[in-house]
Amino acid sequence: MSLRLNRSSGGNTQALGRSRGGFGSKIIGVCDAAGRLVNFVLAPGQAHELAPSLLLLTRLPKAPAWALADRACDAKAFRSAARAIGSIPVVPSRKNAKQPEPCPDYIYRHRNLIERCWSRLKEWRAIATRYDKTATSYAAGIAIAATLDWFKSSR
């Protein structure tokens, strides 16, 4: 697990930004087949998920067999990056796609593992509401919660 932040957003090191829900941050993460957080990146609230997803995909030490993502990552860049590391991209196409890509449902249904991972991490109120002022302390809180989740799941 790493505490690296997405610093490519023009000097905004606190990972705060405006979105529809107000002033906040996004946590973009990668989990393993057991639904445990492996790596994450903090991004401002208005940032798109594609660039941090590509960053996390390149940081993986070993290529997974399948690279599951939601519709936000439906881009040629994500699909080609997943294929470049040796994974098969499983991303549903957007509803208005001119040439929809196939997405095997029997694999995509396992994407709920990351959603359940976020649910477990957001049981920590400080993670769900971002009480921390700095991005470093917020990322440290996420790392602690994820580490305790790893310990809990290894019993």
Image: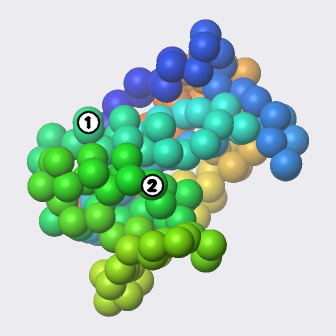
Label number found at residue 86: none
When asked about the image quadrant of residue 105, the answer is bottom left
Q: Nearer the viewer, residue 50 or 130?
A: 50
Label number found at residue 75: 2
Percent position of residue 142, x then y: 51, 40
Percent position of residue 30, x then y: 37, 51
In this view of the protein, can residue 146 be seen by the observer? no
Q: Nearer the viewer, mark 1 or mark 2?
A: 2
Structural crowding at the residue carrying mark 1, measured as other residues with C-alpha within 10 Å and reported as few (<14), some (14–19) or many (≥20): few
Query: Label 2 amino acid?
Result: Ala
Percent position of residue 118, x then y: 54, 59
Question: Relative to residue 121, is residue 111 depicted above or below?
Answer: below
Q: CA distance from mark 1 to mark 2?
A: 19 Å
Q: Is residue 77 left or right of residue 140?
A: left
Q: Residue, x 85% and y 48% (percent of image)?
A: 20
Query: Label 1 amino acid?
Result: Arg
Percent position of residue 102, x then y: 35, 80
Q: The residue tagged with tag 2: helix, strand or loop?
A: loop
Q: The residue tagged with tag 1: helix, strand or loop?
A: helix
Q: Nearer the viewer, residue 65 or 153?
A: 65
- State the residue position of label 1: 59
Question: Relative to residue 119, is residue 151 depicted above or below?
Answer: above
Q: Residue, x 55% and y 46% (percent of image)?
A: 49
Determine the residue located farthest toward the top in the rendered image.
11
When asked about the image quadrant of residue 1, the answer is top left
Structural crowding at the residue carrying mark 2, measured as other residues with C-alpha within 10 Å and reported as few (<14), some (14–19) or many (≥20): few
Q: Is residue 118 left or right of residue 124?
A: left
Q: Nearer the viewer, residue 101 or 3?
A: 101
Q: Is residue 55 left or right of residue 92?
A: left
Determine the residue located farthest toward the bottom in the rendered image.
106
First along the sequence among labels 1 and 2: 1
Q: Residue, x 69% and y 49% (percent of image)?
A: 128
